[in-house]
Amino acid sequence: MFKKILKQTKGYFGRRKNVWTVAKNAHEKGLQYAYRDRKKKKSNFRALWIQRINAGVRQYDMSYSEFMGKVHKKGIELNRKALADLAMNHPEAFKAIVDAVK
C-alpha cells in the first residue's frame, strides 16, 4: 500500500510526493477530484454544445431557445452534440436545418 501510493503520487510537488501522510492525503484528494470531475464533465460538454449551437443560430437572427423549440416542434431528432458538430464543421448542413425550422 505504501509503495503503491508513493508510486501514484510520483509527479506531485514538494512533500506530497515523498512524505507518507502528506502523499496519502494528496492521493485521496486527487481521487475525489477525479470522481467529481468525471460527473462534471458531462455538464461542461452540454454547456459547450449549447454555446456552439447558439453561436451558429445567431448568424441567422434566431436565439438558441427559439431554435431548439422549433427543432423539437418539427420533430427533428438531432441531439445537441450533433447540432453543435454541424454548426462548427458543416455550416451548410446546419443552415439547411435552420431554414427547415424557420
Image (cartoon, rainbow, N blue to C red):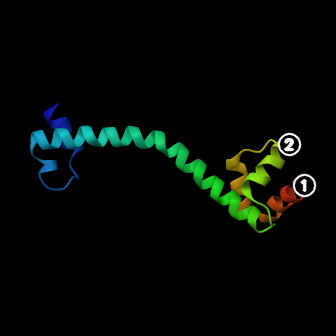
Residue at x-position 16% and y-position 43%: 23
**Outermost top residue:** 1
The secondary element bearing badge 1 is classed as helix
Residue at x-position 60% and y-position 48%: 46
Is 88 positioned to the left or the right of 76 in the image? left
Q: What amino acid type is highlighted by mark number 1?
A: Ala
Which quadrant of the figure contains the C terminus? bottom right
x and y percentages locating residue 54 in the rendered image: 70, 59
- Residue topped by disc 1: 100
x and y percentages locating residue 50 in the rendered image: 65, 53
Label 1 crowd (10 A; few <14 / some 14-19 / many >=20): few
Figure quadrant of residue 55: bottom right
Query: Of marks 1 and 2, which one's residue comes earlier in the chain?
Result: 2
Label drawn at residue 73 = 2
Label 2 crowd (10 A; few <14 / some 14-19 / many >=20): few
Q: CA distance from mark 1 to mark 2?
A: 11 Å
Is 102 positioned to the left or the right of 11 in the image? right
Label drawn at residue 21 = none
Q: What amino acid type is highlighted by mark number 2?
A: Lys
Residue at x-position 34% and y-position 43%: 33
x and y percentages locating residue 10 in the rendered image: 20, 49
